[in-house]
């Protein structure tokens, strides 16, 4: 899934109440599994000047990048964080880890040829889902509208919970970004 979708869905699922530390924890947990991709791709594209085809067709699948993805997308690490949060009674860690695990679960189900090894350090195995959120060869034309509708529903849920004005604006921007990206998948993939 796209990162804006993860943020909307993670916040709707776990940010109760949708403000303060709980909201920030849900956002952080929803973002962290994708953050390394943004940092590495952004540095490669905009600092090092590497062409997008090299970044996304070669570097993305390289052993070094996949090792980073294995760590920040590990069900083992995120599950351990959740267990520690539950053991210690740390609500912020419970919310962040839960949002992270939800992110990983959605990615597990929606990455057809670009999945990540999500059971590190136990295994480097990568699940190749028959369904993709972006690749029309793997049903993305069905997934994208469902994902977009889920994001709209999550925004409505968050709105009704009484978010502060800044959060309503932030999530509106995320929703618009998600709808724009879903449109792009239809046009180009």
Image (tube, rainbow, N blue to C red):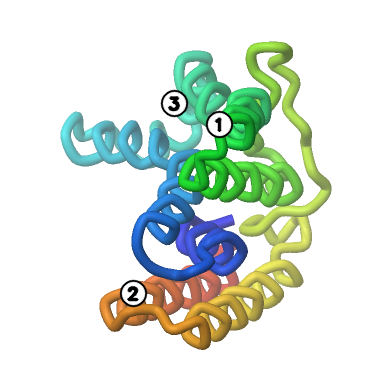
Q: Position of residue 84 (x, y in %)?
A: 59, 28
Q: Which residue is mark 2?
A: 167
Image point 63% across, 25% down: which residue? 80
Q: Quadrant of residue 52?
A: top left
Left or right of residue 101, residue 155 in this image:
left
Q: Secondary structure at mark 1?
A: helix
Left or right of residue 42, residue 71 in this image:
right
Image point 44% across, 26% down: which residue? 59
Left or right of residue 182, residue 116 in this image:
right
Image point 70% across, 46% down: which residue? 105
**In front: label 2 or label 1:** 1
Q: Secondary structure at mark 3?
A: helix
Q: Which residue is mark 1?
A: 88
Extreme residue in the left direction: 47
Q: Which residue is mark 3?
A: 59
Q: Nearer the viewer, residue 79 or 128?
A: 79
- For marks 2 and 3, the one nearer the N-term is 3
Residue 52 sits above or below residue 63 on the image: below
Q: CA distance from mark 2 to mark 1?
A: 29 Å
**In front: label 2 or label 3:** 2
């Amino acid at each position: 899934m796209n990162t804006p979708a993860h943020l909307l869905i993670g916040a709707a699922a776990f940010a109760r109440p949708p403000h303060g530390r709980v909201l920030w924890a849900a956002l952080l947990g929803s973002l962290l599994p994708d953050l390394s991709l943004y940092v590495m791709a952004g540095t490669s594209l905009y600092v090092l000047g590497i062409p997008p085809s090299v970044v996304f067709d070669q570097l993305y699948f390289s052993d070094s990048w996949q090792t980073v993805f294995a760590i920040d997308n590990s069900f083992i690490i995120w599950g351990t964080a959740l267990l520690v949060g539950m053991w210690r009674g740390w609500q912020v860690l419970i919310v962040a880890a839960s949002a992270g695990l939800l992110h990983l679960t959605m990615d597990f189900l929606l990455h057809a040829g670009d999945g990540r090894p999500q059971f590190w350090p136990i295994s480097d195995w990568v699940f190749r889902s028959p369904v993709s959120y972006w690749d029309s060869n793997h049903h993305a034309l069905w997934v994208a509208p469902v994902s977009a509708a889920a994001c709209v529903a999550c925004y409505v849920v968050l709105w009704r919970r009484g978010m502060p004005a800044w959060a309503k604006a932030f999530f509106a921007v995320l929703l618009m970004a998600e709808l724009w990206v879903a449109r792009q998948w239809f046009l180009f993939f």
